[in-house]
């Protein structure tokens, strides 16, 4: 079984914030494949479906972001995920990537992301694939915490649907082809904003 987890904060207060882009990507992926995220399991919203021969679970933890690891660990205890290094994928926002860039990696550290820090701590290491979704850096005068908990800027919102589609497509490629093959394509994608720069 494959398990894909999108990271975010629960509740309407955080729904449209940059920090919740992991939720938004997984919701777009679920919509694309008509997977209902309506079961309350593993301290989150959960959906399970078959995509061809693939047994797939999708999880949106409803803990706060910095407790995401509790939901992931609970799911791994109860679900038939044979090897997290191959069968678990995390999706989350990344300050260190320009808005709209995607980076797929087979393993790594948390990069300062508190949700990922908790997942890595609970699982005892970061040996599992992750799809990072770039949200860009805040202006120098802005606190990074305030930035990630703020809503996307109007120009970013214009490109957000294309970004969510690209990230959902990256998940499709990862699940279908494996991380090593999908990386070659996903990591070379331009961001939607780069493809369609603002008019001068």
Image (cartoon, rainbow, N blue to C red):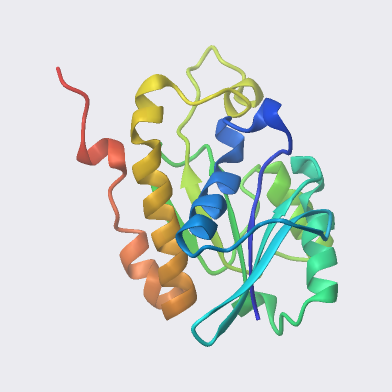
What residue do we see at 73% from left, 38% from top? 10
Regarding residue 125, the answer to whether it shows in the image is yes
Regarding residue 100, the answer to whether it shows in the image is no
Residue 32 location (% of width, % of height):
45, 59
What residue do we see at 50% from left, 56% from top? 31
- In depth, the one of 89 and 43 nearer the eye is 43
Q: Quadrant of the C terminus?
A: top left
Residue 140 location (% of width, % of height):
50, 16
Q: Work out which residue is located at the far left of the displayed protein and give it.
A: 200
Q: Work out which residue is located at the far top of the displayed protein and give it.
A: 141
Residue 158 location (% of width, % of height):
34, 29
Q: Quadrant of residue 161?
A: top left
Q: Work out which residue is located at the far bottom of the displayed protein and give it.
A: 53
Q: Is residue 129 left or right of residue 169?
A: right
Q: Is residue 23 left or right of residue 163?
A: right
From this view, report whether residue 20 is shown above or below residue 131: above
What residue do we see at 36% from left, 59% from top? 187
From this view, report whether residue 152 is shown above or below residue 121: above
Residue 100 location (% of width, % of height):
39, 41
Question: How many numbered dots are placed on residues in this image?
Answer: 0
- In depth, the one of 103 and 41 nearer the eye is 41
Q: Quadrant of the N terminus?
A: bottom right
- In depth, the one of 15 and 130 nearer the eye is 15
């Amino acid at each position: 079984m494959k398990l894909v987890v999108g990271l975010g904060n629960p509740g309407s207060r955080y729904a449209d914030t940059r920090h919740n882009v992991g939720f938004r990507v997984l919701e777009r992926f679920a919509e694309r494949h008509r997977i209902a995220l309506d079961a309350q399991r593993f301290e989150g919203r959960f959906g399970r479906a078959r995509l061809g021969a693939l047994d797939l679970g999708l999880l949106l933890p409803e803990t706060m972001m910095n407790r995401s690891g509790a939901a992931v660990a609970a799911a791994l205890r109860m679900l038939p995920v044979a090897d997290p290094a191959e069968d678990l994928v995390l999706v989350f926002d990344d300050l260190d990537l320009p808005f709209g860039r995607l980076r797929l990696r087979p393993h790594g550290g948390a990069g300062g992301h508190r949700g990922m820090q908790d997942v890595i701590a609970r699982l005892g290491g970061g040996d599992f694939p992750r799809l990072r979704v770039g949200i860009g850096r805040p202006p120098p005068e802005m606190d990074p915490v305030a930035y990630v908990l703020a809503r996307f800027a109007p120009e970013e919102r214009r490109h957000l649907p294309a970004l969510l589609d690209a990230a959902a497509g990256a998940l499709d490629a990862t699940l279908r082809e494996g991380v090593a093959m999908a990386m070659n394509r996903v990591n070379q994608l331009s961001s939607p904003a780069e493809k369609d720069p603002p008019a001068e």
